[in-house]
Amino acid sequence: KNQVEQSPQSLIILEGKNCTLQCNYTVSPFSNLRWYKQDTGRGPVSLTIMTFSENTKSNGRYTATLDADTKQSSLHITASQLSDSASYICVVSAREYGNKLVFGAGTILRVKS
Amino acid sequence: EAQVTQNPRYLITVTGKKLTVTCSQNMNHEYMSWYRQDPGLGLRQIYYSMNVEVTDKGDVPEGYKVSRKEKRNFPLILESPSPNQTSLYFCASRSTGRASTDTQYFGPGTRLTVL
């Protein structure tokens, strides 16, 4: 069964610190891997999209990495801000199923001052 | 402004009372879909539509219906809601279901409670 697993489930960090969120997937073959940010009570918003041939993609203070061989991705947040408090969702697009999106359960990040 | 809108944002209803959640996008996207989000679970797809009059089941379609009569609208219908359909629902759209790197845009969500 195609799955996307994220760790940790939740994380608390101090403002200004860096953090890294992990995503492991078994979806195969896959087209691309996406990271979304979901603020409480809002819809997810796309941060990055990486194809299988890319191993890193940045969006401001967010940097995603991808290792297609080990089927792992990470999202690194630099110099965290209070507004980074949100759920971060890893999503893998399954090529075999017409690019269906398979969602991880998310990592809840809380940045405190 | 490019956006996906949903209505209502919050709804409390009783078992068996038919309801419709509307979804509309202004980006001329072909592909639209509905998801539900429950605590501890990833978003799960209910139904999707590749274009007007083309719809198909997602992972959890039981108890739901959809229609796609116009490109911009994709309503979700619960003919006889039950308490296990209490959830947070998201509508989403992207330009096409075929290109693998299309950005998918989500609506703001509809929080449904079925008593």
Image (tube, helix red, strand yellow):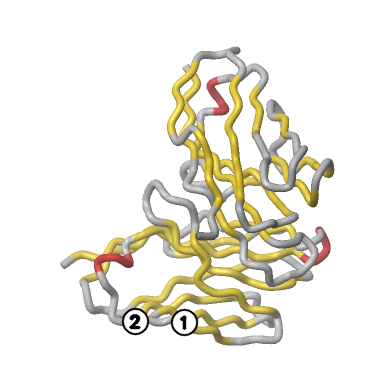
Q: Is residue A30 left or right of residue B18?
A: right
Quarter of the rendering containing residue B31: bottom right
- The residue that disc 2 covers is A78
Residue at the extreme left:
A113
Q: What x and y, as percent, mark residue A44?
A: 49, 57
Q: Compare residues A47 and A55 and report the one nearer the observer.
A: A47
Which amino acid type is shown beneath numbered disc 2?
A: Thr
Q: Is residue B90 left or right of residue B68?
A: left
Reading the chain from its start, which is encountered first: label 2 or label 1?
1
Q: Is residue B65 left or right of residue B103?
A: right
Q: What x and y, as percent, mark residue A5?
A: 56, 61
Find out whether the residues at labels 2 and 1 contact each other: C-beta distance under 8 Å. yes
- The residue that disc 1 covers is A63
Check the image and report above or below for B101 versus B81.
below
Helix, strand or loop at mark 2: loop
Check the image and report above or below for B1 versus A49.
above
Q: What x and y, as percent, mark residue A108?
A: 38, 58
What residue is drawn where x is 39% and y is 46%?
Answer: A41
